[in-house]
Image (cartoon, helix red, strand yellow):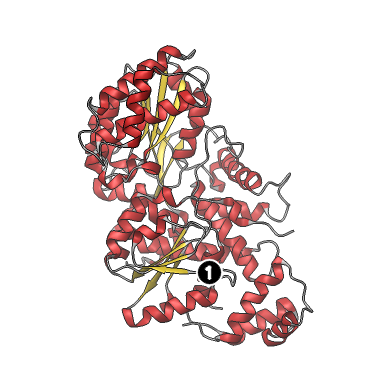
Amino acid sequence: MSRSTGTLWQQLRSGSPICVVFYPHLAALERIVETVMLLAPEEWDIDRADDVEDAFRDPEIPLLLTTEDEAGAVEVLNGRRDQLEERSAPVILFLLKGGSGARALREAEGLESWVRGQQYDPESAEIDVDQERNDFKAATGLPPEEWLAAWRHGRIPDTLKNNFAYQRALLLTSRGDST
Amino acid sequence: MAYDWTRLAPHRPLKPRDPLHVRRPGDGGDEIARWIAAGADAVAIAGPVGSGKSTELAWAASSLWGRFVAVQVPLDKVLDMRRITEDQVFLQVAGRIAAVAHGALKLPLSAALEERLTRVRSAPPMLAPGVLTSPARDLLLQTLREVAESSHQGEIALLVDGLEKCAPSDALQIARALLELKGQARIVLIAPFTLVVGSGAHELLSSVDRLFFLHAVPVRQDMGARGEAGRAFLREIVRLRLDLSALPDDLVPLLDQAAVASGGVPRSFLQLVRAAGTYAALGVRETMMAEDLAEAMNDHIESLERLLVEGDIEELRRADGTTGVEIPEERRLRLLSHGLLLEYKTEAGDVVHPAPLLERALRKGVAP
């Protein structure tokens, strides 16, 4: 997994109530949404909304928030961010790179500090598949396909550690390059 | 053992009497409480994002309890801070005081006051103009006086959080309105940077008895014993939040590295540690390693560098180790409030340093 894709994997599991994903243009947005869905924990039942008010409902449901008025959404989320505190699943806010929402985020110092280090920019997500596969094998003793097969046959114990390995194996086998 | 790093919850301030609270080295909520107990009518708290203002406000409330009816008012949790009005604030404060009277104090309020408060709760004036017959400020004064008089403490301390989320002009207006309550209650409020630093600071600073500036905690190796005390403070936060009897030896140097990288800002520190721990899980490792922390730091570096605008790097370089007052005001306010420039209290006075994770940008002169 590339560093940038790793960032996305990390931020989806960090417990942060909100994180940000940048996209370069609308045509790429759906592809990036797919990447997010792919990397999300398997047990998540993800919702998608275009109304920022949805961020304040159903705190246990992960929410992909793609709004037309991105700057307005940032303003609302910044002003009411403490109402997001109890979310057990994140709001994943999509912002056009360099757009009005991204600029508004720079001004929204409180919200920005919440998502510091929790910002995924897929444009730099260059994946070195070979390196990642080697790393996986070094960590688990098996290539991802074999590890996945063993997992599916119940030969690998269902531990927290192995669940993480499962996510990683899925990513490496289903899409070599997540971008 | 595998740690649950999400328990670090960097975004969540602690509540009054929270067992997870760790006393800051040198300054914190205890000092604010001492000022109030010593007679200060009004105290403003300011500091960079993530420095622990809300947590220390809650701790001050805990410390004041007993001598005062300490009422914490987190405006931002109940109001839309973009459209806030004085009346809404007064009604919220009145409601919180009544809630404390009913809850912690078990105080009966007069039937007339209960009736008015109930009417307001069921139909707030913002939703139904005209329902409230007396101005919101009157209702607040009535609540303040009645609770103060019937409580054994005899005096109320209001600890107000959330003004930094308003537009600066709204924040000033609300602060003004709250500070008019001096004499009826002691006031502690978290103020946005714009109200306490620079040329716009005069009005608020002349209306409060003390400004409590929550500096970044000293963490640098060259800060000697103070730096070690700061790092120990941050380590202890992790120990408590992860519910460990002691920190494992292999984790301590990594936490110290994260502490230094954070510049002593607790939220940044916790974000770095949480992210490093999650990266360790991605690497199918039970505990974090230096490479995990490096990944977390890289993510933060990218976020911080996104905040830089033209001219910042030169100013940050020039300001390093000085008081920072030479930086033009608007830029200084932005750098300080975002935590791109961090202020430290030293024996020789206050000095500023750029956030440590901007080191790459400062070295290379990365243009935004």
**In this rendering, is residue B8 above or below A37?**
above
Q: What residue type is labelled 1?
A: Asp
Q: Please tell me which residue lies in front, B197 or A150.
A: A150
Tell me the residue at 25%/43% (across/down).
B168
Residue B77's image quarter? top left
Examine the rendering and report whether any part of residue B310 can be seen: no
Tell me the residue at 55%/68% (across/down).
A44
Question: In the image, residue A34 lies at what x, y percent?
Answer: 46, 79
Please state the total of marks drawn on the protein image: 1
| Quadrant location of the N terminus of chain B in the rendered image | bottom right
Q: Please tell me which residue lies in front, A177 or B139.
A: B139
| Quadrant location of the C terminus of chain B in the rendered image | bottom left
User: What chain is tagged by disc 1?
Assistant: A
Q: Please tell me which residue lies in front, B67 or B147.
A: B147
Question: In the image, residue A136 lies at what x, y percent?
Answer: 67, 79
Q: Please tell me which residue lies in front, B185 or B339.
A: B185
Seen as rendered, the residue at the extreme right is A155
Tell me the residue at 23%/26% (across/down).
B135
Question: In the image, residue A179 lies at what x, y percent?
Answer: 46, 82
Examine the rendering and report whether any part of residue B111 can be seen: yes
Q: Mark 1 points at which residue?
A: A45
SS under mark 1: loop
Q: How crowded is mark 1: few (under 14 residues within 10 Å), some or many (20 or more)?
A: few
Question: In the image, residue A25 lies at what x, y percent?
Answer: 32, 78
**In this rendering, is residue A119 above or below B88?**
below
Tell me the residue at 54%/45% (across/down).
B219
